[in-house]
Image (spheres, grey):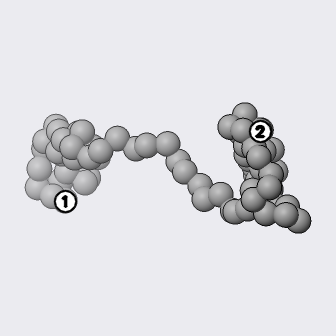
Amino acid sequence: MKAAAAIRGRKVKDLVAEGLRTVLRSPPAGPRTRRIQLPIVKSKQPGTLRLGNETIAEIEARLDIGHES
């Protein structure tokens, strides 16, 4: 930090203050999102399968478990 401030010809406290201002001005990071591949559930008769939110959440959870590294 001292070296970075010296290279820029600034005091450490000024460099830290600038960094804090930069971070506080930027929007907070939201939750990570990932794209879901459709169809979630393959069907021989598309459009006939009725899924509720709970069932979809369970399927997504299973997909997440399968993609963890």
Rendered location of residue 58, percent (x, y): 77, 38
Residue 43 visible to an observer of this rendering: yes
Residue at 60% from the left image edge and 59% from the top image edge: 35
Q: Report if the CB atoms under discs 2 and 1 are less than 8 Å apart.
A: no
- Kindly indicate the quadrant of the structure image that contains residue 41: bottom right
Please report the residue visible at 24 percent of the width from the left and 39 percent of the height from the top.
24
Image quadrant of residue 9?
Answer: bottom left
Residue 38 spot, x, y in % from top left: 70, 63
First of labels 2, 1 by sequence position? 1
In the picture of the structure, the residue carrying the numbered disc 1 is 7
Name which quarter of the figure residue 25 lies in.
top left
**Residue 51: image tag:** none
Q: Farthest residue in the right direction?
A: 44
Task: Provide the residue designation for mark 2.
Answer: 55
Which residue is farthest front?
A: 48
Comparing 56 with 11, the one in front is 56
Kindly state the secondary structure of the residue where label 1 is placed.
helix
Answer yes or no: is residue 16 visible: no
**Mark 1 crowd level (few <14, some 14–19, many ≥20, 10 Å Cα):** few
* Image location of residue 69, percent across then percent down: 76, 52
Label 2 Cα crowd, 10 Å radius (few <14 / some 14-19 / many 20+)? few
Mark 1: amino acid: Ile
The residues tagged by marks 2 and 1 sit, at their Cα atoms, a distance apart of 58 Å
Q: Name which residue type carries label 2.
A: Thr
Q: Residue at x 80, y 55 (%)?
A: 48
Front position among marks 2 and 1: 2
Query: Along the line of sight, which residue is nearer the eye, 11 or 54?
Result: 54
Q: Is residue 25 left or right of residue 31?
A: left
Front one among 61 and 15: 61
| In the image: residue 10, left or right of residue 44 | left
Q: How many marks?
A: 2
Q: Position of residue 42 (x, y in %)?
A: 83, 61
